[in-house]
Image: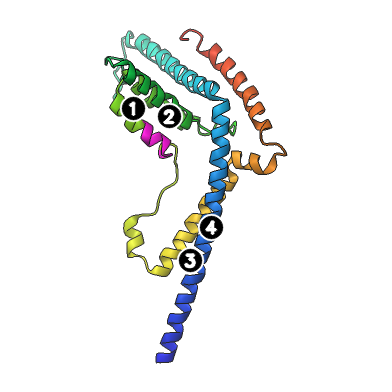
């Protein structure tokens, strides 16, 4: 019985050793992919700063324009005899009511421009799926910027640039990890890294890096894409711009 018990313990230790080695390998691969991808995305942002900012600001204006049209139609309905006021949240409009020194104004502008580049909806994939989330975050950012609240903007900038604002993944519960056995915890850590690795490899910018003969040509594609996008958004928001 004792020999069998020690045999099981040795087997468990061996399994843990193997899983730990796999986790280390997965983490290294993930770190390299994320480093290459982040470097490439930083290069893209540096080449498309003005375009990216204008697209986000125009999307915000377009959303505001649609909201104003909706409110106008609602006001017309209010004039009707049978109208009943709906129950819901009211739209809060922020006004710039704070004055700052030139240094603070410069810092507010810097924080705003840095943050808005990080809430791009699709990380240059030319995919419209994440636009709603990005527009929501952008609206909060622009309202905070226009309100001139430096402290709030600093907190929002930190939240956005950390990646949390656009991160859709749910982390494992800390309590659950503590109550799990060592083997189960390691297995879950490995599975989490495998999932993150799949996401990293499927990122459009990483595919560009690994599949394009010359990844820099992708920047030219994006310039054409955003020039067209800006032109369309300008037409849609011409009454507000």
Q: Is residue 17 magenta?
A: no
Decide: marks 2, 3 in contact (CB < 8 A)?
no
- Residues under labels 4 and 3: Cα distance? 10 Å
Which labelled disc corresponds to residue 153? 1
| First in residue order: circle 4 vs circle 3 | 3
Q: Which residue is mark 2?
A: 115
Which labelled disc corresponds to residue 20? 3
Q: At which x and y percent is residue 94?
A: 31, 18
What secondary structure do most residues of the magenta stretch adopt? helix
| First in residue order: circle 4 vs circle 1 | 4
- Residues under labels 2 and 3: Cα distance? 37 Å
Q: Which residue is mark 4?
A: 26
Decide: marks 1, 3 in contact (CB < 8 A)?
no
Q: How many marks?
A: 4
- Residues under labels 4 and 2: Cα distance? 30 Å
- Residues under labels 1 and 3: Cα distance? 41 Å
Decide: marks 4, 3 in contact (CB < 8 A)?
no
Q: Nearer the viewer, residue 76 or 106?
A: 106
Q: At which x and y percent is residue 221?
A: 66, 27
Q: Residues within 10 Å of mark 3 (few under 14, many from 20)?
A: some
Q: Nearer the viewer, residue 132 or 58?
A: 58
Kindly identify the residue that appears in the image at 40 percent across and 14 percent down: 68
């Amino acid at each position: 019985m004792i020999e069998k018990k020690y045999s099981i313990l040795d087997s468990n230790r061996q399994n843990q050793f193997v899983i730990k080695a796999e986790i280390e390998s997965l983490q290294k691969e993930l770190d390299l992919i994320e480093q290459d991808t982040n470097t490439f995305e930083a290069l893209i942002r540096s080449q498309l700063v003005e375009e990216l900012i204008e697209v986000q600001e125009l999307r915000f204006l377009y959303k505001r324009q649609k909201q104003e049209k909706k409110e106008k139609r609602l006001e017309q309905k209010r004039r009707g005899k049978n109208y009943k006021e709906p129950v819901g949240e009211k739209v809060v409009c922020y006004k710039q009511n704070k004055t700052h020194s030139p240094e603070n104004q410069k810092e507010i502008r810097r924080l705003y421009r840095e943050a808005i580049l990080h809430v791009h909806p699709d990380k240059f994939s030319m995919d419209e799926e994440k636009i709603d989330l990005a527009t929501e975050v952008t609206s909060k950012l622009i309202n905070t910027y226009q309100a001139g609240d430096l402290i709030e903007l600093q907190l929002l900038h930190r939240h956005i640039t950390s990646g949390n604002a656009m991160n859709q993944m749910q982390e494992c519960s800390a309590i659950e990890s503590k109550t799990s056995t060592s083997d189960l915890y390691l297995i879950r850590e490995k599975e989490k890294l495998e999932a993150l690795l799949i996401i990293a490899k499927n990122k459009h910018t990483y595919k560009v890096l690994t599949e394009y003969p010359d990844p820099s040509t992708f920047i030219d594609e994006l310039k054409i894409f955003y020039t067209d996008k800006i032109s369309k958004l300008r037409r849609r928001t011409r009454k507000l711009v």
